[in-house]
Amino acid sequence: MQEMITTYSIGEVAEKFGLSLPTIRYYDKEGLIPNLNKNEAGVRRFTDENVGSLQMIECLKNAGMPIRDIKQFMQWTLEGDASLDKRYQMFQELRVSVLKQMEAMQNTLNTIDFKCKYYGKATEDGTEKYVKEEMHLERP
Amino acid sequence: MQEMITTYSIGEVAEKFGLSLPTIRYYDKEGLIPNLNKNEAGVRRFTDENVGSLQMIECLKNAGMPIRDIKQFMQWTLEGDASLDKRYQMFQELRVSVLKQMEAMQNTLNTIDFKCKYYGKATEDGTEKYVKEEMHLERP
DNA sequence: CAAATACCTAAACCTAACTTTAGGTTAAGC
DNA sequence: GCTTAACCTAAAGTTAGGTTTAGGTATTTG
């Protein structure tokens, strides 16, 4: 009896993640997708595990992690339980980094919100002149 | 009677913003710092206005805006009130963009938080084996 | 006055993360 | 059996955002 394993083509996966085909091939070449296999014809077939790797790649990219470090992480997963500590530490550090980024982003948003108000009034007035002095009190 | 205007050297400004000297010179060359002048000896002297531009550059960079667009904005400020609409629109679009980025960042953080818990338990157990099946229910 | 410090320019160089190009294989539909 | 679509590789090219290099000036300090 045979187990039927569903796999996906690179096109399907590219569609799913909104990535280009060359980008996915590049990730593969860089070792970011462990255990990704090709069929007899040399065509990549993505298992659910491989799709999961891509999901994680997207997450780590979003966290600002460079490709080289994502690769490192993926290589660790191949080492199994021996690398659990390293992976744990990585995620803890990443967490701190992301929290910092969110804080910075919040400050940025505050400044932008202020500027929206500022330019809102300025466009109403048709000039920056009045709002410039008026709001300088709020933001020196 | 003379007005005394306090200015800063590129070194002081670099220090203040944690930027390298070449980076600031590069911003200047790219036209990101309107009205930045040099003294008789050809040395840049930063006024408070110039420092303010750098502050804004840092904000816009943080919002993910490319140098070319920051330059555009700075050129608009030189055009005065005629460009108020454009600047207002820019900040409104930027606001939306930043909100999206913060949402994405929050999702990323959630995934990372999950992974921290996951690897926390795994390192306790000394193996991923148990936690893998156990937590698969939470995150399929 | 010598030497260290702080600045200057122009131009070349660098890195990350892709993208493009060129040429080739395979499978499905008509 | 031919064409079209979807895949493949290797290698070169691209872009952003700086950094480095090389050579020079101006000012302060021992």
Image: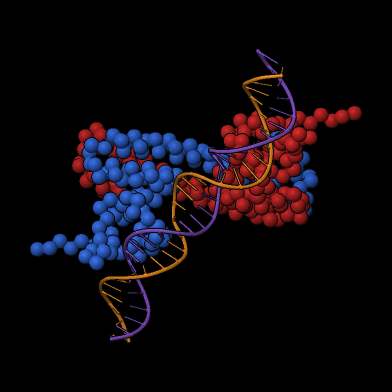
Chain colours: A blue, B red, C orange, D purple
Left or right side of A101 for D25: right
Residue B129 or D13: which is nearer the viewer? Answer: D13
**Outermost residue toward the left in this view:** A1
Q: Quadrant of residue B3?
A: top right
Q: In the image, is C3 to the left or to the right of A7?
A: right
Q: Which residue is pictured at 24% across the width and 33% down the height?
A: B124
Left-right relation of B30 to B2: left
Question: Which residue in the rendered view is the most extreme toward the right?
Answer: B1
Q: Residue at x 25, y 61 (%)?
A: A38
| x then y, percent, for residue A84 | 27, 37
Residue A51 versus residue C27: which sits nearer the camera?
A: C27
Asked if B101 appears above or below B40 in the picture, the reply is below
Position of residue A34 measured from the top left corner of the image (x, y, whole percent) = 28, 50
Left or right: B84 in relation to D4:
right
Q: Residue at x 65, y 30 (%)?
A: B12
Q: Can residue B21 be seen in this view?
A: yes
Q: Look at the image and tell me in which quarter the N terminus of chain A lies.
A: bottom left
Residue B67 location (% of width, % of height) = 60, 49
- Residue A47 visible at all: no
Q: Quadrant of the C terminus of chain A?
A: top right
Which residue is at 18% across, 63% downward?
Answer: A4
Q: How many marks?
A: 0
Residue A131: x and y in percent read: 75, 44
